[in-house]
Image (cartoon, rainbow, N blue to C red):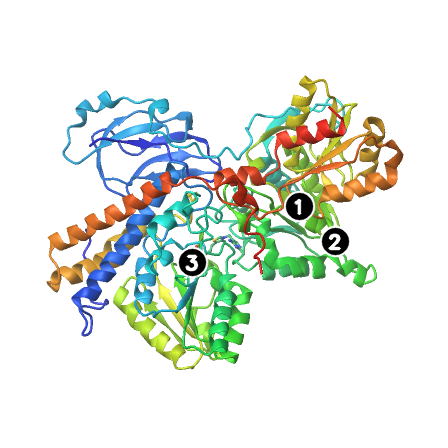
């Protein structure tokens, strides 16, 4: 019986991949566990093993093919001893392959977003080059490590494995094991060691494989890192960066999908950055590493693979506390940060088609917050909607609402609305996960409410 | 196939019946076939997120479950499918949870890493490395408090064994004589980090000595050795002598999760264990050489398991997605 071998999904966020190399040829007999091919996913090159035994009949997708969608038939395998010369008769295209519900497209599409060249972050005429957020973060760390001997990186799988999400790719090779350090799975311990090393004169970057695991280290982050400068009467600063992916990835459920933006923003003594674009990721991370305070740097797994234009500058940094206006508008102010920007920008596009002009502000850092850019915008548009992925109670948007009410009450023509994730732990089921996340439609609805349309 | 080294493994032991061996064979094979199927469904996009397969480690849970009595409890990490099958949970419900469907053990809301069965005393499925260790001691605390003689099997990995909360737990478990068996499934890797790169201590079980907890190292590719050690540990706990540590040396054949490029070890290393130390193959040989079963008997078992697994897969595809209203249920328990 001939069976199709389908392009496998080899990571939670993979939708398509490159069939890098076939390791078998037509006519080969394979057993369960044999490697059939090398497949390049959004994260890495992976070996793809056979599950069934049999003879490779026909290879449908030649090696080197890019953009092969998950579940496309890539080869045909027949039972042992079967004559597969007739196999091509079960010619199938991707469209005809067995009806399988498509994996939830939890990841936003990966079209590059244009960065307006003469943005305020880089001087006029600065050249731009596309880079993924992943590359931008890596470059930021590499540049700072070249610049300052005291910068080191520690965390689980950051060195030999090249990073669980490949953010630290190449750093071990360049900087060696003294400065790029694999830790055991002991978050509370190594977060504390990072704090102590910062006391001792280093500038450690502590990577949490994801911020969900930083919960194990919370005491060191809050009680030791955030409060020491104050408790020491200003003597002892703690220049440590805690960074890693934050928020929902795709289908990893309650214990691995949480946005901690509001949690850390609550704490005096910390600085909190949460970039959306690759340029901001780079410029803000470099600033974070140089900052004399503990910085929480919240990244996002889904954004890692997205490309943006990044200024070509020898030393590109972005100051904290300076929002970026992605799009100017007159009818409503949308305020967001991190992956929330994806929904804000998408909503603004759709609203423009309906003649509603939205101004879109990316806060970029949550401590400090650029209140004045927000207030100036609200004074102009008289309406505001905030967007974030976290839970609704005590959300960053709640705080902004209160701030706007206090400082621009007379300018408001409608209450400030907060679009957030739902008030539930993240469910695993694909349909429920979609419902739990904030959506572009919800942003559009909120805008229509505040603009009375 | 390379010659296997059977001399270090238990041969047919006195007290091991043909029924026992057949049951171990069946239970281990069920886990392996189930996991292979899960891997396949993941590749097809039917299972999402993280999915950690137990292939290679089957003898650990099967050996220990053979020593558990009614009411004994178990708790483990995200690598939990095998534990659930071994304690008698329904493959259909487990697979449907993997596909995120209504028929799953958590109604599709927990997924591969977070599954529970109160009825089978399976307390999860925990996604945070090491978090299940104090929880296991807490279950034992409750049993002792309630005055019964139940024990709790608390499974964790070699990577988890370095978490600080493990040692806080050891201290209290011995201090309060809790009936908990700490089962370290030492598969030699925590994701891409081999044990040699994460600790200088030569063994994990010996760390218990600092707290006064006895323990031992066990060959986890030999189900009878695991069972023997388990019996000793259970007797220790039931006698009110406090916790016990089993460091079970095992091996995972597949990647850490589905998205592991596995560059930290060689194909040959994996292949060698598969060929020379495989636990299922070991029991198969014991059955055949001891003439407890013929090839045909084993084929019949294989066939039956294939049916169970296919049925589970079909169920997991046919079961509907949870109702949208499920998003809002189970946040608070009602009084
Ligand atoms: C607190 C915490 N840190 C990191 C992770 C990410 N992570 C998941 S599994 C794993 C490796 C664990 O290895 P081990 O304890 O040996 O168990 P195994 O996977 O080998 O069964 C890591 C680092 C996590 N889930 N929780
Ligand atoms: Mg391990």
Q: Are marks 1 and 2 in contact (CB under 8 Å)?
A: no
> B97 left or right of A186?
left
Q: To which residue does mark 2 refer?
A: A267
- Residue at the farthest front position: B335
Q: To which residue does mark 1 refer?
A: A297
Q: To which residue does mark 3 refer?
A: B117
Q: Secondary structure at mark 3?
A: loop
Determine the residue positioned at 68% across, 35% down: A280
Dots 1 and 3 on the same chain:
no
Determine the residue positioned at 18% across, 27% down: A84
Q: Secondary structure at mark 2?
A: loop
Q: Quadrant of residue A26?
A: top left
Q: Nearer the viewer, mark 2 or mark 3?
A: 3
Provide residue A324's location: percent of width, then percent of height.
Answer: 74, 32
Residue B277 visible? The answer is no
Q: Nearer the viewer, mark 1 or mark 3?
A: 3
Residue at mark 2 to residue at mark 3: CA–CA distance: 38 Å
Q: Quadrant of residue B117?
A: bottom left
Asked if residue A106 is positioned above or below residue B266 in the image, the reply reads above
Determine the residue positioned at 67% across, 52% down: A150
- For disc 1, the neighbor class at 10 Å (few under 14, some 14 to 19, many from 20) is many
* Pick the front one: A130 or A71: A71
Determine the residue positioned at 45% across, 48% down: B107
Provide residue A381's location: percent of width, then percent of height.
Answer: 81, 27
Write down the chain letter for disc 1: A
> A222 left or right of B202?
right
* Pick the front one: B52 or A278: B52
């Amino acid at each position: 019986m001939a069976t199709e071998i389908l392009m496998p999904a080899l990571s939670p966020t993979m939708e398509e991949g490159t069939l890098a190399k076939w390791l078998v040829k037509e006519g080969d007999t394979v057993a369960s566990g044999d490697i059939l091919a090398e497949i390049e996913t959004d994260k890495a090159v992976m070996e793809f093993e056979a599950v069934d035994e049999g003879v490779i009949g026909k290879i449908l997708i030649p090696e080197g093919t890019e953009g092969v969608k998950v579940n496309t038939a890539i080869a045909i395998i027949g039972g042992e001893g079967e004559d597969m010369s007739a196999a091509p008769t079960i010619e199938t295209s991707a469209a005809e392959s067995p009806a399988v519900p498509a994996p939830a497209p939890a990841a936003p599409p990966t079209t590059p977003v244009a960065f307006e060249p003469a943005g305020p972050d880089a001087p006029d005429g600065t050249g731009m080059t596309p880079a993924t957020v992943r590359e931008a973060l890596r470059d930021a760390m590499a540049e700072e490590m070249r610049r300052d001997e005291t910068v080191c990186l520690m965390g689980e799988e950051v060195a030999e494995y090249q990073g669980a999400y490949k953010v630290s790719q190449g750093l071990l090779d360049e900087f060696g094991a003294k400065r790029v350090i694999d830790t055991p799975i002991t978050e509370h311990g190594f977060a504390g060691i990072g704090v102590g090393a910062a006391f001792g004169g280093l500038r450690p970057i502590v990577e949490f494989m994801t911020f969900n695991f930083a919960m194990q280290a919370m005491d060191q982050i809050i009680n030791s890192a955030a409060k020491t400068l104050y408790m020491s009467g200003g003597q002892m600063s703690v220049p440590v960066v805690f960074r890693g992916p934050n928020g929902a990835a795709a289908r990893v459920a309650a214990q691995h999908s949480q946005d901690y933006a509001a949690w850390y923003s609550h704490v005096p003594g910390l600085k909190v950055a949460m970039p959306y674009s690759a340029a901001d990721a780079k410029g803000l991370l470099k600033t974070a590493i140089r900052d004399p305070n503990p910085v929480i740097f919240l990244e996002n797994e889904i954004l890692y693979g997205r490309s943006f234009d990044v200024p070509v500058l020898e030393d590109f940094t972005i100051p904290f506390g300076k929002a970026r206006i992605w799009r100017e508008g007159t009818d409503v102010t949308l305020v967001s940060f991190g992956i929330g920007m994806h929904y804000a920008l998408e909503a603004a596009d759709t609203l423009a088609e309906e003649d509603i002009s939205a101004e879109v502000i990316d806060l970029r850092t949550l401590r400090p917050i650029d209140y004045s850019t927000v207030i100036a915008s609200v004074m102009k548009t008289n309406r505001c909607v905030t967007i974030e992925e976290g839970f609704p109670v005590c959300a960053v948007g709640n705080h902004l609402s209160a701030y706007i009410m206090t400082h621009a009450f007379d300018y408001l023509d409608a209450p400030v609305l907060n679009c957030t994730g739902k008030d539930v732990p993240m469910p695993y089921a694909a349909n429920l996960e979609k419902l739990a996340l904030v959506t572009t439609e919800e942003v559009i609805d909120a805008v229509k409410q505040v603009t009375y349309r | 196939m390379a010659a296997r080294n059977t001399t270090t493994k238990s041969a047919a032991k006195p007290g091991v019946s043909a029924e026992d061996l057949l049951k171990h064979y069946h239970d281990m094979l069920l886990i392996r076939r189930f996991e292979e199927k899960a891997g396949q469904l993941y590749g097809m996009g039917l299972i999402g997120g993280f999915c950690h397969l137990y292939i290679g480690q089957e003898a650990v849970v099967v050996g220990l479950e053979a020593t558990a009595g009614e009411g004994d409890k178990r708790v483990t990490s995200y690598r939990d499918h095998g534990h659930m099958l071994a304690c008698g949970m329904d493959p259909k419900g487990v697979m449907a949870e993997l596909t995120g469907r209504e028929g799953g053990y958590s109604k599709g809301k927990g997924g591969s890493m977070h599954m529970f069965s109160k009825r089978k005393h399976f307390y999860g499925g925990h996604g945070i490395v090491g978090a299940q260790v104090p929880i296991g001691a807490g279950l034992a605390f409750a049993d002792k408090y309630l005055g019964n003689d139940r024990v709790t099997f608390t499974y964790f990995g070699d990577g988890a064994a370095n978490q600080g909360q493990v040692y806080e737990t050891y201290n209290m478990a011995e201090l309060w004589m809790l009936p908990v068996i700490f089962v370290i499934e030492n598969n030699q890797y925590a994701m891409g980090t081999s044990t040699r790169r994460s600790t200088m201590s030569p063994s994990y079980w010996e760390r218990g000595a600092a707290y006064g907890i006895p323990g031992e190292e066990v060959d986890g590719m030999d189900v009878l050795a695991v069972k023997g050690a388990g019996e000793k540990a259970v007797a220790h706990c039931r006698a009110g002598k406090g916790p016990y540590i089993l460091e079970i040396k095992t091996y995972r054949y597949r990647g850490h999760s589905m998205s592991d490029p596995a560059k930290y070890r060689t194909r040959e290393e994996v292949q060698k264990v598969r060929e020379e130390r495989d636990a299922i193959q070991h029991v198969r040989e014991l059955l055949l050489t001891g003439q407890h079963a013929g090839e045909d008997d084993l084929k019949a078992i294989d066939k039956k398991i294939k049916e169970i697994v296919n049925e589970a897969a079909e169920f997991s595809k046919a079961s509907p997605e949870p109702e949208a209203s499920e998003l809002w249920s189970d946040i608070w328990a009602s009084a």
